[in-house]
Amino acid sequence: MTTLSTIPSQLNVGLMGLGVVGTGVASILLNKQESLAGVTGRPVNLKKVLVRDLTRPRVIDLPDDLLTTNAEDILADPDIHILVEVMGGVDPAESYMKQGLAAGKHVVTANKEVMAKSGPELLALARKNEASLLFEASVGGGIPIVGCLMNELAANDVISIRGIINGTTNYILTAMAQHGTSFQQALGEAQSHGYAEADPTNDIEGIDAAYKLTILASLAYRSRFQPDDVYREGISKLEPQDFQYAQELGFAIKSLAIANLEEGAVQLRVYPALLPTEHMLAKVDGVYNAVEIDGSLCGQVLFHGMGAGREPTTSAVVGDLIEAARKMGAQHASPLYINEGTTNVPVRSIDDLESRYYIRLAVADRPGVLAKIAKVLGDGQISIASVLQKDVHPETESAELVITTHPAKEAPVQKALQAIAGLEEVRRVSNTLRIEE
Amino acid sequence: MTTLSTIPSQLNVGLMGLGVVGTGVASILLNKQESLAGVTGRPVNLKKVLVRDLTRPRVIDLPDDLLTTNAEDILADPDIHILVEVMGGVDPAESYMKQGLAAGKHVVTANKEVMAKSGPELLALARKNEASLLFEASVGGGIPIVGCLMNELAANDVISIRGIINGTTNYILTAMAQHGTSFQQALGEAQSHGYAEADPTNDIEGIDAAYKLTILASLAYRSRFQPDDVYREGISKLEPQDFQYAQELGFAIKSLAIANLEEGAVQLRVYPALLPTEHMLAKVDGVYNAVEIDGSLCGQVLFHGMGAGREPTTSAVVGDLIEAARKMGAQHASPLYINEGTTNVPVRSIDDLESRYYIRLAVADRPGVLAKIAKVLGDGQISIASVLQKDVHPETESAELVITTHPAKEAPVQKALQAIAGLEEVRRVSNTLRIEE
């Protein structure tokens, strides 16, 4: 436990993980020592690096005695003040973080999965041990959204968070919008550029974005949320014509992560949605990320930047490292980052969502079809805003029908869609997307 | 001087100034006590408010015994821990801030003029007295750019800052671009909406933006700059046709504040410039502000939001107040915000700028004019990128010529413009603007 009388004259860092981000962090610690000492007030020294395999070739030249395969060389060393965890995954990263915090070490992590699932427990453990736990790199790469929610924007009641926080899906959606490619083709391109992993499930199904949204919402609403609280839809059902029709209607399609407070409860959702093309978030293309905070005082503040990659993530990790270094000896003043369970803001069900909807249907090209569909919607008190009839295929006698609705509740819309799917004239409910405004 | 053993159980705030922002701050301190105590860890109490006139009617209801016209009631009260200065102007605000810091009080200010002119001295005084001096509200209103440069982005070497940091000029330029109005008409509209003052000089001549840029550059480059280091051009020379021609060429016109490091020196400038329409900053309209930081690690991060107004500025002031409260008793760990003079990054002259240029000329409608102008430019090694000939006025036999150049140095361009102005066929060099890319 660090106290005023024991602030060390030099800070020693133990780095866990030497992948893409770990290499970036090590490089800064080795090559920018003067600059780091300038902003932290004392030398910052990389003392030990945990790796899986000592003999593996590396893109960075490190002295041999810096490397270890034994986590205890970092965890049990009382002279290591700051632990930087950039291994990823839950096991053993979470256990190392816990051991580090329990020993009074400050922990800086890029681990969104651990922070989303166990953040509040880890923060409580950090406070108990008068240590800092910092995790800017877990969301938004080089965009300083975590720190801003905790600090600069702390005066605000957060009304909503809306973000594009997964670069892989945004790259795929941008390619589909700009080049009319299919989902599979765009995914293949993303994989060949290294923007998507061989198993892309975490990205394209919104799991990664749900982790990040859980972290942001927990900070914004000072309550505890879990990844399972997030309603999720992936992007794999999108087809090129969805982008074409959206554009005709004045919208872009983006995978959004949204948290908003309504009637005392927070609604958490990740799904592809239609956004007016003039909205700032609609202009976020490629691997960029953006987060818009709507605060009671600040109004809508948008952050835009690189959401992933070696350098942006290193910016976040080293920024946290500097903050931890500056805070040394000041842990008694550590703020209440996250409500650790004394109050819990309830989660609002997706069934209670009120939204406009975009519905694309394959229907028989026969008179009276639209009237039948309109009746089902009308029976559910769902009001139609616009109808496009498209792409009649003479050989199959089918047509494509695109309907947008006025604001309606999710539950009756889903019920109406089931009824519509059951109509004899309806071949397929091809896609249903929500419209954000 | 606050030490560990004397951290007070309740924080008392002295507020200086009860104008638009002061009213916002007072309202939060009075109405959000539970929430403030939640994030700071202890009650925050508004103890005294300095006003000019006790009898003036106010939009906020304050207990009579809270108000005073005597600054000493705040400055000499040892139980007031945090001084919030939102009076504006240099005198007496700066002197009050100095007295407060000298007494070990934490100071939160929205005062861009004082921070631009005397920031480094005040920060040195703050450190000497183990007090915090926080000034998020001095730049960008609700956009957390000051804190991010000091903290979250501290790992970066800043390559450049480019911002739209004066809402009044951006409102005027947006009106001119969207409605083709004249500068005078747009200014009148801005005044009637309360977005411009009766004497708009500070805004339209870039003085306000130069103060803000001085603050941002001092933080980013950890050196000391003065408002006089900023090369400034106002927006009053712009005419509706500049916006029309810029648009034809694929550009928007925005008043930009730019700091960039080149060859070891920082160039500081505020002027209206052409920006490609697809650039994020070109899309910042009306009274919105935006700042783009290009960092060595984070890449380009853009912040966009409300740059002024009661609520956004209150968000910044109260955010700083929360930070000061959280730091109580932790001043020994206060970071080196600004280099207080041990190193000084030199300022690069505008003459050394290399830029593309947009030049609009009124010329005689005669053969050979363009050849003469092109020769002058060629003699100065300035290469033409495009030429538009426009608006022949038969009655005056004059035509409008719009030339854009490839990158060229400022000094030879200005010399060539003088020579061009002296040509018999040239009636007027109507406008010269730089093109940012």
Image (spheres, coloured by chain):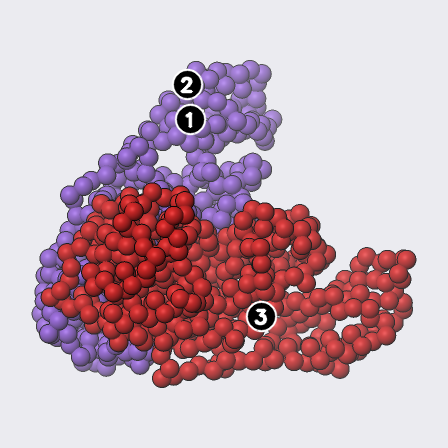
Chain colours: A red, B purple
Q: At which x and y percent is residue A72?
A: 29, 63
Q: Is residue B202 above or below residue B135?
A: above
Question: At numbered mark 2, what does the secondary structure look like: helix, strand or loop?
Answer: loop
Q: Which mark is residue A203?
A: none
Do the CB atoms of the residues marked 1 and 2 lie less than 8 Å apart?
Answer: yes
Give the residue pinned by disc 1. Answer: B408
Query: Type of residue at label 1?
Result: Ala
The residue to which callout 2 is attached is B380
B424, B31: nearer the viewer: B31
Residue A177: x percent and y percent? 65, 52
Residue drawn at (58%, 77%), measured in percent from left and top?
A350
Q: Label 1: few (<14), some or many (≥20) within 10 Å?
A: some
Q: Circle 3: is it few (<14), some (14-19), or many (20+) Cα within 10 Å?
A: some
Where disc 1 sits, the SS reads strand
Measured in 3D between alpha carbons, the distance from the residue under mark 3 to the one under mark 2, in whole angstroms, is: 61 Å
Amino acid found under the numbered disc labelled 2: Gly
